[in-house]
Image: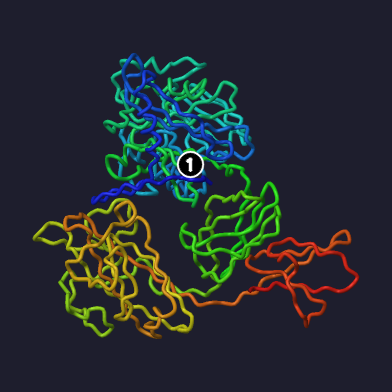
Amino acid sequence: MITNTVEIKVLSRFKFPARMLLIAAALLFMTAAQTPAQTVLGPWVPLFKGIDRAVGTNNPGNGGMPDLMVIYALRVDLTDPDIQLYATPRIANDYVLDARETAGYTVSNFLTMHGLQVAVNANYFHDAGTSDTESPSYTDAPGTPFDVIGLLISHGVVVSPQDSDDYTASFMFTTNNQVTFYPTNWPANPTDGINTAVTGLYTILRNNINVGSNYIGNQDFVHQVNPRTAYGLSQDRQYLYLMVIDGRQSGYSNGALDWETAKWLQELGAWDGANMDGGGSSCMVIEGTTGRPIELNHDSAAAAYGIERTVGSQLGIYAKPLPGFINTVSALADDTAATITWETTSNATTQVRYGLTTNFTFSSTLLTAPVTNHAALLTNLTPGTGYFFAAYSQAGNNVYISSNFFFTTSNYATSAVLLDLTNSWDYTTNDLDGTNWTAPEYDDSQWTGSGVALLFTGAPTGVSFLNTELPINPDTGFPYITYYFRTHFNYTNSLLDVTLQFTNYVDDGAVFYLNGVEIDRVRMPEAPNPIFNSTLATNYPCDGYATCADLLTIAGDLTTNLVQGDNVLAAEVHLDDPQAQTITFGSSLVASLPQSVSPRLGILSSNQSVSLDWTRGGFILQQAATVAGPWTNVAGPVVSSPFIPAKSESNAFFRLWRP
């Protein structure tokens, strides 16, 4: 995890994504570059255990490199035992050698899907069924099958074999990260014992000689000024260098030639290196403090098209957080409680601050007894809910705070699917202002039509399950500002303590109604502002399209209008701009009822000692002389296992108790 990450969110009225950029550091170096020293590499700053980060800039002129550049680099210590490498695996379905080899995802998605701390694009690739000279689309949907060029090995499995032609520079790693660099991977190189392998387009640095200069004057597009991704190795093979050079962004960074890329690798400390892939694919992402992906560089695909590019090959890294005063923070969550544990390097107090956002609104009881092994109990939590938290410990006058962490409470419940995502909806584009169209008794038989979700207009980028195309306004050539939807579902279970969980895919905003009663607004003017047919949504989702879900949970008073039998769910979906190109709608609904689940307390006897163990969080260990009690908390209190009771001649009974 990373401490003190700054997120600068760039928003526009167009459907471009809000990006998390670390441009400030780059601008700082660009200012420094106005001095006679035109090439500036910033200091290596620890990012994770075994991984450091640096930012560099080049201002052209005075005999230096001729192109305006901003570079982002990571130095990976391959001798760190906690560093693990992971390359893109084979496509899950219908793998075909040299055709359908991997499923494409953005680098950010790749990092999130596999729980990585670092991810960077790797091998060149092209769409399955096309030649390797055809460039992949910038709008390929997640999961698009790709043919990867050059050797790619993931967890010992060959995903893509070696290729001839000019795709020649391979990095091969054993399970303990011993690395071999092959400036050419043709003919066949030994792959026995190789756990991870990635391959670049061509070698640009060999034995500390800048062989990228061999391409000076080459008119092929790949050898012109471009955004680039390059990997390098130190002479002793202790360090792997990962570097991206931003480009195609006038006034910020134009990109690099091959020899400039090799020179940057030398600046970083590399002895050998290769140009991997580049252009819109060049992207470097790290895990933020809350687990969200943060892009370090400013990729050219996002700058030009407002989206991060789907790529066919990535290299990921698992790494541990940086050690500090507070270490090994862990959360053991139950349904309505959680136990948070951590260690400190010296005796300190114990407290956790937590909430539904990183603006923590709650805190655990402050335990003032100084200890090095800490455990805090959080109670009165909501089942099936995500919480952010941080550990606080004070030693003397010094207060130490951990990075922000996240856990989700369990939900011991029986669930029933009431609507799936491909449910059929009736729809209309008529102006229904002043009409009670959400009421169960309303007659929608004369509406425009019906269709299976997701319902859409235009061609939403990267959205799955598009099934029914909606009409557009013939007077404007754009979608209508508002579309109205209705559907029915049958509910037969108990109405007591039921929770309704909606998964909505909405582009741009929507208002939802259950049996004629409003239950939620998504990116619409807040209640009690009235909603009309002409009302515009206040924002757009995700990267501008319905590529991620809007989750809605209603319980308590909001479920009082749910009935046993037939129910009507209605929604009105609004554009955020009268000239927006797309609209998308679909929703699934699950009903959950609480279920009582008792914890299990285990006893292990060995070598005349007894150890108590339990695997659920949120409980306090209690003790009594008899089963009838009285029961008292074990001194501490003890909220995490294992626990070894003191030896005693008398009987002792133990139980777990939820406050």
Up the image or down, 496 lies above or below 507; here it is below
Q: Quadrant of residue 322?
A: top right
Residue name at image x 47 percent, y 40 percent: 119
Relative to the observer, which residue lies in front, 98 or 254?
254
Q: Residue visible at 53% across and 74% down?
A: 413
Q: Nearer the viewer, residue 462 or 44?
A: 44
Which quarter of the figure has residue 58? top left
Q: Left or right of 199: which side holds 548?
A: left
The quadrant where residue 614 appears:
bottom right
Numbered disc 1: secondary structure: loop
Q: Quadrant of the C terminus?
A: bottom right
In this view, the residue in front, 27 or 416, is 27
- Residue at 41% in and 42% down: 295
Position of residue 411 measured from the top left corner of the image (x, y, whole percent): 53, 70
Image x and y of residue 149, in percent? 42, 33
* Residue kind at label 1, given as amino acid type: Thr
| Picture coordinates of residue 100, whole percent (x, y) | 41, 42
- Residue in the foreground of this view, choosing between 23 and 118: 23
Q: Is residue 275 left or right of residue 48?
A: left
What residue is at 57 percent from the left and 30 percent from the top? 191
Left or right: 121 with respect to 436?
right
Q: Say which residue label 1 marks.
A: 88
What is the crowding at mark 1: few (fewer than 14 residues within 10 Å), some, or many (at least 20)?
many
- Residue 526 visible in the current orientation: yes
